[in-house]
Image (tube, rainbow, N blue to C red):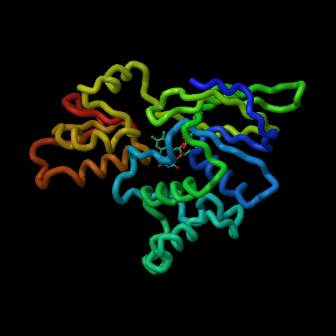
Amino acid sequence: MNATPLDSEAPRDLVGVGIGPFNLSLAALADPLTGLNAVFYDQRPAFHWHPGLLIEGARVQVPFLADLVTLADPANPWSFLNHLRARERLFPFYFAERFHIQRAEYDAYCRWVAEGLPSLRFHHQVDAVRWNPERGLFEVDYTQLDAAGEAEALGRTHTRNVVLGVGTAPHVPDPLRPLVEDPLVPVVHAADYLAHRDTLRAAGHVTVIGTGQSGAEIFLDLLRGAPAGGGGGGLDKKSRRAKGQCFC
Ligand SMILES: Cc1cc2nc3c(=O)[nH]c(=O)nc-3n(C[C@H](O)[C@H](O)[C@H](O)COP(=O)(O)OP(=O)(O)OC[C@H]3O[C@@H](n4cnc5c(N)ncnc54)[C@H](O)[C@@H]3O)c2cc1C
């Protein structure tokens, strides 16, 4: 591993930790501000918004104007409408009058923004943030990861401000963790639903635990994928006969 303990650059105005929708929005809003020296780090190789839940037809709950920038800065170039324009889809989108866009479309829009912003650094895992009182700056230590996710180099950035946008991790109750971690047992968290959909559809009985948005979408998707007539299997919320389980 290359050790790069100190960067030689001038202190940044802003370091963002995590590039989910929260900090992606901040990066897009900061992009036109040429006087602001900002950089954003994420440990993942690229932007993806809950890839295990991009179920065909599932929509986000707010209209498209609540994109990454428009309500704060309507003239910002990283708007959803500009994304449609770049894809030559502006007129079809408008005349379809479906203003609650699909979750997969929101993910594609965010990836378009992420691919265009020069301030983003993927493959960078932030390991520590410290206040340096002598310099009056934060020190942000990171590990640069290679394509396999292994540590490749260490680095440090100094900055006047830090914005944490590290989001939430999918939660599995401790007693159930061994089941979710066993690849031979068809018990999955909603975050990994699409990768296991075929297994769950073939299970005969599936119990969906949790009745929020993700649970409802998965319940509906499993119903839509069930064979006509039911075939003797089923979906329920508490069955002890369940052969597959999905936590949402
Ligand atoms: C399974 C699941 C489904 C969800 N579905 C919905 C939904 O349908 N609608 C909705 O509105 N919300 C949903 N949420 C809530 C979710 O928190 C928001 O949608 C949104 O993703 C939050 O954005 P964020 O930028 O705060 O965090 P995230 O999108 O979680 O992004 C955080 C980023 O920080 C990075 N990161 C974390 N630690 C470090 C580190 N040390 N160094 C570098 N990078 C780091 C992560 O890799 C990640 O990319 C869901 C959450 C989960 C877990």
Seen in the picture, residue 41 relative to 54 is either above or below; the reply is above
Q: Quadrant of residue 30?
A: bottom right
Decide if residue 8 is on the left or right side of residue 115.
right
**Tally of marks:** 0
Q: Residue at x 42, y 28 (%)?
A: 172
Seen in the picture, residue 160 relative to 4 is either above or below; the reply is below
Decide if residue 187 is on the left or right side of residue 33.
left
Quarter in which the N terminus is drawn: top right
Where is residue 237 shown, x and y percent of the image? 30, 38
Decide if residue 189 is on the left or right side of residue 164.
left
Q: Residue furthest front?
A: 2
Q: Residue at x 65, y 60 (%)?
A: 69
Where is residue 140 shown, x and y percent of the image? 71, 31
Seen in the picture, residue 37 relative to 150 is either above or below; the reply is below
Where is residue 72 shown, x and y percent of the image? 71, 61
- Image quarter for ligand 1 equals top right
